[in-house]
Image: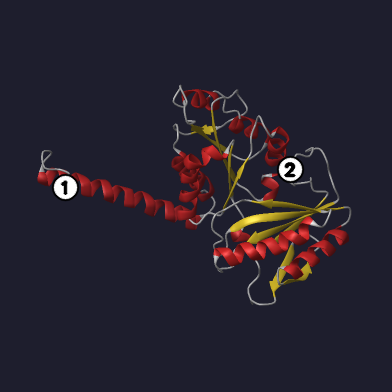
Amino acid sequence: GVGDSEAAKKSSFTNSSSSTTTPTTIMLNILGRGETTAEGAARAERLMAVARAHPLCKIHWYGKEEVKKGRKVGHINIVAATREEARLVLSELLKVDGVRLANASLDGVLTSSSSSSSSSSSSSSSLPKVGIIMGSDSDLPTMKAAAAILEEFGVPVEVTIVSAHRTPERLVEYAHTAHKRGLEVIIAGAGGAAHLPGMVAAMTPLPVVGVPVKPAGSHLDGVDALLSIVQMPKGVPVATVAIGNAANAGLLAVRIIATHDEELKNKMLRYQEEMTEVVMKKAHKLETVGWANYGK
């Protein structure tokens, strides 16, 4: 899937200044096509090998373990002085990926068609709507619960690492470009000083959900992260969930998007109904067998 914008800010997710501007930026999404993970990874590697050799390309591989159909596993940004130059590079990349450039509108939306499939290489519905970021990969065991919830509801998601302290320029760029890339909600998890959610919220117009993470060996049990995230100054809101409760962050993101997505709203209603049914069954069983025999 591809998209470009005139006078777009550079969105490379590398340590580059967020103030840098270029005439044209095109993002080529790397999506799974339903092949095996090994085949998908090999296809992506062929594409990225060509991109690595091109000075106008910036590669972003998300490191996902599986390459499922429709799942975004990475993207390549093409940053060029002119639209024509960017489109030329894009055409070269698409040939490697078995796709040809079909046409482009003057409004900056490119479409592509596969030479081996009648369907397009991606659709707008497969573009990530929620960004999940964390300060370290050690936060992933906590944060993956949010990704699992979003996957359950069919909400496309991107997951990456953005450290407020170790990669401040990357943080600035991510926050400034998130809404331009189509994200609607950002979920940010951090432990300790936990500045990531608040700093992102200060630089994006999108709603930010903060997840306090309890780091391994923490002496404060995540309370330090909770207080750091929840105590935001007026004008910079961060919705904060309980310590380690990334699942609730995912559910909140679903509800935010569901305010303008009727299908997603109906999915949430069904989810709530199922929760009610589970509790009612347990209540009925407890009342029937009695407290002494419950669970035996």
Residue 108 in view here? no
* Discs 2/1, front: 2
Residue 90, percent from left and from top: 79, 63
Type of residue at label 2? Thr
Residue 286, percent from left and from top: 15, 43
Query: Residue at the spot x=45%, y=31% of the render?
Result: 243
Quadrant into which the N terminus falls: bottom right
The total of numbered circles placed on residues is 2
**Secondary structure of residue under mark 1:** helix
Quadrant into which the C terminus falls: top left
Label 2: few (<14), some or many (≥20) within 10 Å?
Answer: some
Looking at this view, is 4 or 160 the one in front?
A: 160
Say whether residue 92 is left or right of residue 246: right
Q: Residue 285 carries which label?
A: 1
Q: Which mark is residue 14?
A: 2
2 or 1: tag closer to the N-terminus: 2
Looking at this view, is 163 or 203 the one in front?
A: 163
**Secondary structure of residue under mark 2:** loop
Residue 68, percent from left and from top: 54, 62
Residue 241 in view here? yes
Type of residue at label 1? Lys
Looking at this view, is 279 or 171 the one in front?
A: 171
Say whether residue 108 is left or right of residue 124: right
Residue 150, percent from left and from top: 49, 51
Measure the C-alpha gap from mark 2 to mark 1: 55 Å
Label 1: few (<14), some or many (≥20) within 10 Å?
Answer: some
Query: Residue at the spot x=54%, y=58% of the render?
Result: 66
